[in-house]
Image (cartoon, grey):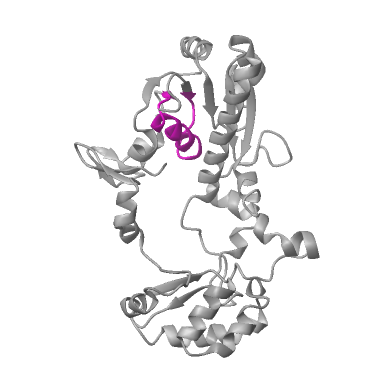
Amino acid sequence: MKLEGITVIDLSLFLPGPAATQMMADHGARVIKVENPRAPEPTRSATAFPWQQGGETVMLRNTQRGKESIALDLKTEEGKAALRELIKSADVMVEAFRPGVMARLGFDQETVRELNPKLVYCSISAFGQTGPWRDRPAHDTATVAASGVLSLSCSPADPNSGPAIIGVAMSDMLSSYLALSGVLMALLRRATTGLGDYIDISMHESVLAASPNILGPVFGGDEAPDRFNERSHGGGAMLNVYRTADGRFLALGGGEHKFVEALFEGLEHPEFIEPVCGPAGPGHREAIAFLRATFATRTLAEWEAWFFGRDICWSPVLDLKEAWQQDHVIERHMRVTDEEVTTISVFP
């Protein structure tokens, strides 16, 4: 277990912090979750998260399993004293309150450093600990909207469609991974300096940082992307989604020349190879129209048979249940079964 011997104090709720500390727990860390006795972890609530397994919400099992829990009221001196004792012997502390809350409680980074100079202190918030937006309340969707990425989540088949909610908690999970990597780097550095560190993670910035491949128009042209002229957002024939005859969908996911050639040679329309290998946008539109009409002539199962053995980057669009039932997912141990019920291991 890679993190055996590491003790983590988890003061976070919902997803960004708990997901990061769950990964630490899965790899052997001792994670002590500190909960407010008057308002415990929200994912315990079957009202807010109705799907359950083994008497617990699925959300709780996927983000809190293997952790210890202690109820401390940090507005009381007794609760603060107990947390101070935990901090003295811990290696990592993760909190996800709004900026300023930990200082009001008496646990800002300077105070905590005096208690334990070796502690790695990680704060996760919507917009970071500084800046004009630091006090804005926000969860995942609002931070993704502020990053510009939500504006790109529109149907490539409908130029008039507005932004659509992204199907995963994108900034929650990206900030979780950044928090984990920051903590691990700080622990590595501590091995040579003997000192801890402070890590300021912004959910908003985690999405900004995930956008290097789509910033060409912004940095190179001082303009927002026109999504129907961008290969990643619907302007490319080989990075697009197509409906099949039975109302299912398939996705093409790679525009390298070999994939383009294999697809259009296989469909007996090689005249599309040259334009589709060129820049996304107008040159792709005739090919996109052809592919929409062609893929609509057969069922998804028929297209799966057609694609079998061909060197083309593609996939059926699976629903979430189908995705978690695939043999590949089971063999890779992303979904495992314990003695009571099936639980999902979402952190490899």
- Residue 3 visible in rendering: yes
| Residue 287 in the image, given as x and y percentages of width and height | 56, 85
63 w.r.t. 259: above or below:
above
Residue appearing at x 39%, y 76% in the figure: 307
Asked whether residue 156 appears in the rendered view, the answer is no
Give residue 233's quadrant in the image: bottom right
Q: Quadrant of the C terminus?
A: top left
Quarter of the image where the N terminus is located? top left
- Quadrant housing residue 274: bottom right
Most extreme residue toward the left, as rendered? 340
Residue at point 38%, 20% (across, down):
70
User: How far from the left and from the top, in percent, is residue 5?
Assistant: 44, 18
Q: Is residue 330 above or below residue 254?
A: above
Asked if residue 14 lies in the magenta stretch, the reply is yes
Where residue 326 appears, x then y in whole percent? 31, 58
Q: Quadrant of residue 232?
A: bottom right
Q: Which residues are magenta?
A: 9-35
